[in-house]
Each structure stands twice: as C-alpha cells, then as structure tokens.
Image (cartoon, rainbow, N blue to C red):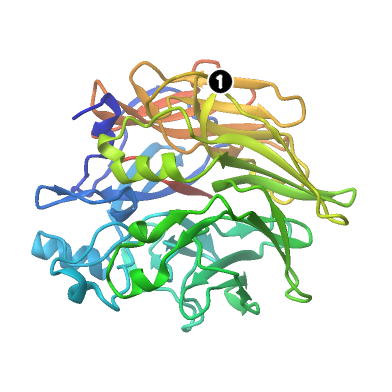
Amino acid sequence: MPYPWSGGFRSLEEEHSYSIAEIEGEVPRALRGTLYRNGSGRNQLGGQWFAHWFDGDGMITAVRFAESGIHFRNRYVATPNYRDETKAGRILNRGFGKMRPGGVLANALRQPANVSNTSVVIENGRLLSLWEGGPPYELDPKTLETRGVADFGGVLKAFSAHPKIDPESGELFNFGIDYGPKTTLTPYRIDKGQVTRFTPVTLPYPLMNHDFVLTRNHLVFCLGPILVRSLSMILGMTSVDGALHWDGGKPTLILLVPRDGRGAPRFIETGAFFQFHFANGYEEDGALVVDLARYPDYSVIGQALRDYWRSDWPGKGMAELTRLRVDLASGKVESKSLAAGSANEFPTINPSCAGKRYRYAYIVCNPAGRAQGLQQQVGRVDVESGAVAIHDFGPHGYVGEPSFIATGSGEDDGVVVTLVYDAVERRSAIVGLDARDLAAKPLFTARLKHHVPYPLHGYFSRD
C-alpha cells in the first residue's frame, strides 16, 4: 500500500454479526439505539481496483448500543450489480468511474449500475439505502437483509443520498437530477410514506449536485459549475466521472425552491465554487444563512476521489467550512471562513437544529498547513464565536463522518460517534466523544475484529 491510510480502502468481503468484546470506557446510558452507516465495502474485484471510490458496492453497518453492550453487523446491499459481479468475479457493469468491457458499443445507452453505496435513512419505519443516481433499496432494520427496490410505486427515479428531515414535522425532503434533452432537478417530499413530487426545475446546463439544505421556507441548492458532458456519457464514450469538467467561467447558482411546492424557483448568481456537503442553513432578518464545506473548484478533490487508495490526499485545494449570507431582497452574497485547520469535510450538526439558527458544527479535518493525508481529526466549530475544539487521532488513526447523537436537551448535550481506522493494527474502532469536551479522552472505544472500509454517511435510530 502506498500510504498509511491506503489500507482503509481495502474491501471487506465477509459479513459479520457479533457483540464487541474489546471496549474501553463506558457508553452513556442515554445512548441507546442503532447507528447505521453506508459506504463502499468492496473497492476491488478480480484483483483490480475500481476506477473511482464511488464505484464500490454499498455495504451497510449497524452498530447497536444496548444495555447488554455494543453489537456490530455488516451486510452488503444485494443489488443486481453486487450479485452479478460477485458471481462472475469481474466487472460487468458501468459505474461512476468504471466501464463495461467491450468499448463504446458495450456501454452505449446503458445506465450506471445502482450500487446503493452512499447513505442511509429511516422513513416511516423503513430502512432505505441511498445512491443518488437511482431509487433507494429497502433493508430489514434488524438483519440488514435486502428487501428490494423502494421506488414508492415508481414515483422515485433519481433520488439524492442527502435527504433532509424537518425535526418538527418529520417530513422528509429530497431531490433527484435527470439528464436528457434538458437537465431537470425534481424535489420530493415524503410524509409518512406518501410522496409528493414537485414540479421539476429546468437547469441551464447539465451539472452534478450532491446535497442541499432545508430552511423554514426553502430547499436551497448551491449548483457549482461542475458540468456534465451528458451526451458523451449517454452514448457510452466516457464514464460519469470522465464526463465531468469544471467551468470556472460560469457562476455558482444558488437555487431557492419554495418548500410548500408553490411559487417559482429563484436563481441567484455568485462566484464559482464547489461543495459536496452542507452543515446547515436557516433564514433570519431577510437573509438566508448557509454553512458548507467549500472547495475553490473541483480539480483537486476530483482527482483525489479518482485515485482514492493511492492518492496522497493533498492539503492544498481542499475544502474550508464557509458561511454564505444571502440577502433575499437584493440577492447579494457574502461569505466568511469558519475553517478549522485544513481539509474540512463531512460537516454534521445536532439533527434537532436542522433548518434553524444553531451554534455547533462537527467536521473531519487536518491541522492547518498539513501537506497531505486523509483526515485524522474531528473538530467542533462554534459558528457564532469561531472557537474550535479538536480531537486528534494521529499518528495512526484516520476518521470518518462524525455523527452527533443527542443524550440530553442542550444543543451540544450528546455524543459524537465516528469510525476510526488504525493504520498500524489495520482494523477499525467505534469511538464516542463527549460533544461538550471534544478534546478529552474518548467516552468509549469499541475495537472491531477487522477493518471497515471508509464509510460515507450514516443515520442514528433511537430505540
């Protein structure tokens, strides 16, 4: 392996179910429930690494915190791609970066396979595995057995991996992007299993978008100029990844869609930037406030994702936690950095604060000035004062998305749980940090028998 962090991308072929025996510290009594995560569990096949990190087959992990201890389970989402390629032992389908053997004719007019590898959510009691290029898959919440495609009666086509749940109403909002003669973004609302499909919004050109924020009145998108050569992709001349190109001469479009489904969408232009993920957004005093992990462009992160296991993950050109303030009357956009060190990513919050004014965001990051390497720190950023608290897992630990799990009524009254890969032991641990004292010794560390390939996103379901 070229770098210490590279081993965390190795596939985990085995599916496990066991109570974790090696636990240091104590899980708070208020922490009871299951933390589900999704990510690329298989990144290699037939001795060949996949062309892109996003090609990997989705593998769900379920970490259950109970009175009796901590239980771990992992299981692959049994998509047709996973079943067929497992049986064949080789690549058969298109993906985000990979192509079918056989050149253009073998790939033309074939959609990338749904590998269901990005996120997970529970809606109306149904556990859904998400991948933004197609519909969700439903899984059994206890066994993780795949039940099948959950397209809600054929209504859902493309469905993003970043749904937003209103903490008061319980409504789930999401979107999908469809490419064709014109590119459209379709918002959705799901309330107790009932889907409302909003009027599609026609975009000025084909582009890629991953996330959005939900506020009191709007669904808010920041559409950076990462354009898609959709015709070349559809005709099989290139992969999805190969069809992407950055056009810094175009603006980033801030798209506001009324969350009640009424009224026309609004586009506001600002200087070009790219983001994968948002922390939060809200409206106050005639302005829209949006906090996100801002990249100057797509070039550095795009190449790192392409190289993933063999990438040096450079520090320069990576994201900074940034606040945008949009005057809703004039459309003027102001921004300021909220950065904690470098390589800020996977921003999360207390879910009860979604769409509201809030104070604390949790991110993965590296020390300022570090030249390269996957993130080794979890940070808590006070978005009001700018104060930053850091827990460092170096020199051998590499961290995943921090999940805030509330254990009390205060915004920061909770546990921040993350998965840490130890490059020396070559296995992973589930680590819980006190959200109010992030730099302190972990509340608990539960060491697994094996590694878990770096996951992407998760969802906590309370008992």
- Which of 212 and 252 lies nearest the eye of the viewer? 252
The residue that label 1 is drawn on is 390
Residue 233 lies in what quarter of the image? bottom left
Please tell me which residue is depicted at 24% across the width and 32% down the height of the picture: 7
- Which of 28 and 128 lies nearest the eye of the viewer? 128
Q: Position of residue 163 (x, y in %)?
A: 56, 59
Residue 408 lies in what quarter of the image? top right
Please tell me which residue is depicted at 49% across the width and 34% down the height of the picture: 318
| Residue count near mark 1 (Cα–Cα under 10 Å), binned few <14, some 14–19, many ≥20 | many
The quadrant the N terminus occupies is top left
Residue type at mark 1: give it: Ile
Relative horizontal placement of residue 102, taking residue 350 as reference (left or right): left
Q: Position of residue 305 (x, y in %)?
A: 36, 44
Q: Position of residue 56 (x, y in %)?
A: 28, 53
Please tell me which residue is depicted at 55% across the width and 33% down the height of the picture: 363
- Residue 452 seen in the current view: no
Q: Position of residue 73 (x, y in %)?
A: 32, 47
